[in-house]
Image (cartoon, helix red, strand yellow):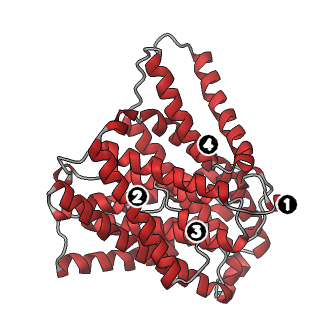
């Protein structure tokens, strides 16, 4: 890469963005989500580079940072997409318990598989199982354009809850002390503090966004959201809750039960801010997602495909994920299980949390190929399922980030 000049770098970067846009358009015809096409494109570029004898290495820290930024964008975008109300209570309840129960049972199942296969500490197996149990909202949310509004809404809520709950549980198990009354009390107190901070900081962010006279607003707010997320991580707070609450507050401002606030923040002003945030967030999320999945796909080495332990352990874990999801949707939620049952992709959040596992909790016998196998296999299952999902052509639309955003939720 040393022989490439600045203009050639720009050509490569812009070409990748154009490629991502093309993927977003053709995905509606081949019914494979564009993020999966990006992932497979990254793998293909790695294969071409290896065959050409090119040695290209991207620092893992770059992928991690892109993943964190993408996670913040996706959670914020989900908050901006969700409407609250009495008619949504059943939906919110069902999606919350679906996310929680499937997350917990999947974690127990994966922990058991890792524990009996690798024979290492149970706590370490749980720490590894938690990221593998979280549904990837970064793949799910951009892949819903073929579904009805009711199915979209359920899966958006469920994926968002899965992210937030998974990160909270992960932070608990990587703390210095777990499985004690003291640690449980601290964990509960952190949640309460985060909820209180969410409301307070959301009003502060709204004040900054609504009252600043500068036209450059969004990236100021986005920088503050990143600062809040990073600060929350330092103090072991589930800071994604703050980001989700801020998005929900912007999108549901008319339901805030404090009439005096309408005088300072008129609904028309909030509506214009909401439209601006919808547009810029979708565009920015698209850009971050593009480079994250391309770089992650490029980092995958396919030589794990011939390793027995990768195929056995990875296959058992993917099978467990499918069985747990099927049983819950079929017998507890009693909902139409297709295509919801195939939405088991693991992706951005799983990768980000794997980077966050402390050295003293790492499994010495864990093969990183298992992670790659699960991400690829779970994504392929979703892609194949969406190909067989039947819906009239008149309901097929282009991906949301390229449409004029409307409040369909």
Residue at position x 70%, y 45% from top? 24
| Residue to which mark 1 is pinned | 394
Residue at position x 55%, y 54% from top? 139
| Residue to which mark 3 is pinned | 340
Measure the C-alpha gap from mark 1 to mark 4. Answer: 28 Å
Which mark sits nearer the N-terminus, 1 or 4?
Answer: 4
Image position, residue 346 (x, y; %)? 46, 55
Image position, residue 290 (x, y; %)? 58, 41
Which mark sits nearer the N-terminus, 3 or 1?
Answer: 3
Q: Is residue 224 visible to us here?
A: no
Residue at the extreme top of the image, as rendered: 3
Measure the C-alpha gap from mark 3 to mark 1. Answer: 21 Å
Decide: few, some or many residues near mark 3? Use Cα within 10 Å; few <14, some 14-19, many ≥20: many
Which mark is in front, 4 or 3?
3
Q: Is residue 29 above or below residue 11?
A: below
Closer-to-camera residue (172/303): 303
Closer-to-camera residue (8/394): 394
Cβ atoms at labels 2 and 1 below 8 Å apart: no
Image position, residue 233 (x, y; %)? 35, 59
Residue 287 circle label: 4
Measure the C-alpha gap from mark 2 to mark 3. Answer: 16 Å
Which mark sits nearer the N-terminus, 2 or 4?
Answer: 4
Q: Is residue 262 above or below residue 58?
A: below
Measure the C-alpha gap from mark 4 to mark 3. Answer: 27 Å
Decide: few, some or many residues near mark 1? Use Cα within 10 Å; few <14, some 14-19, many ≥20: few
Which mark sits nearer the N-terminus, 4 or 3?
Answer: 4
Give the secondary structure at mark 3: helix
């Amino acid at each position: 890469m040393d022989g490439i000049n600045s203009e050639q770098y720009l050509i490569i970067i812009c070409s990748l963005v154009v490629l991502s846009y093309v993927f977003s358009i053709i995905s509606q015809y081949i019914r494979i989500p564009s993020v999966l096409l990006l992932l497979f494109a990254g793998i293909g570029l790695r294969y071409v580079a290896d065959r050409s004898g090119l040695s290209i290495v991207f620092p893992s820290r770059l992928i991690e940072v892109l993943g964190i930024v993408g996670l913040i964008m996706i959670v914020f975008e989900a908050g901006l997409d969700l409407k609250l109300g009495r008619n949504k209570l059943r939906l919110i309840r069902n999606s919350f318990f679906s996310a929680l129960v499937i997350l917990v049972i999947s974690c127990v199942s994966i922990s058991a598989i890792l524990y009996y296969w690798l024979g290492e500490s149970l706590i370490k197996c749980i720490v590894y199982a938690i990221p593998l149990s979280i549904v990837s909202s970064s793949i799910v949310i951009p892949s819903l354009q073929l579904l009805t509004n009711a199915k979209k809404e359920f899966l958006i809520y469920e994926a968002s809850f899965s992210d937030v709950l998974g990160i909270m549980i992960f932070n608990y198990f990587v703390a210095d002390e777990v499985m004690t009354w003291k640690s449980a009390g601290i964990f509960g107190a952190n949640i309460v503090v985060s909820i209180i901070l969410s409301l307070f900081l959301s009003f502060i962010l709204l004040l900054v966004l609504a009252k600043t006279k500068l036209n450059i607003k969004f990236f100021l707010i986005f920088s503050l959201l990143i600062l809040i997320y990073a600060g929350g991580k330092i103090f072991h707070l589930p800071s994604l809750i703050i980001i989700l609450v801020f998005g929900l507050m912007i999108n549901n401002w008319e339901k805030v039960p404090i009439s005096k606030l309408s005088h300072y923040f008129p609904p028309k002003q909030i509506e214009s801010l909401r439209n601006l945030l919808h547009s810029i967030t979708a565009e920015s999320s698209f850009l971050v997602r593009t480079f994250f999945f391309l770089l992650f796909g490029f980092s995958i080495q396919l030589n794990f495909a011939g390793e027995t332990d990768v195929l056995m352990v990875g296959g058992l874990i993917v099978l467990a994920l499918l069985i747990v999801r099927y049983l819950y949707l079929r017998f507890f939620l009693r909902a139409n299980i297709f295509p919801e049952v195939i939405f088991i992709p693991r992706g951005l959040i799983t990768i980000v949390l794997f980077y966050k596992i402390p050295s003293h909790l790492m499994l010495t016998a864990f093969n990183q190929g298992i992670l790659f196998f699960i991400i690829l296999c779970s994504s392929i299952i979703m892609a194949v399922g969406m190909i067989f999902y039947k819906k009239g052509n008149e309901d097929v639309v282009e991906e949301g980030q390229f449409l004029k955003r409307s409040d369909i939720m």
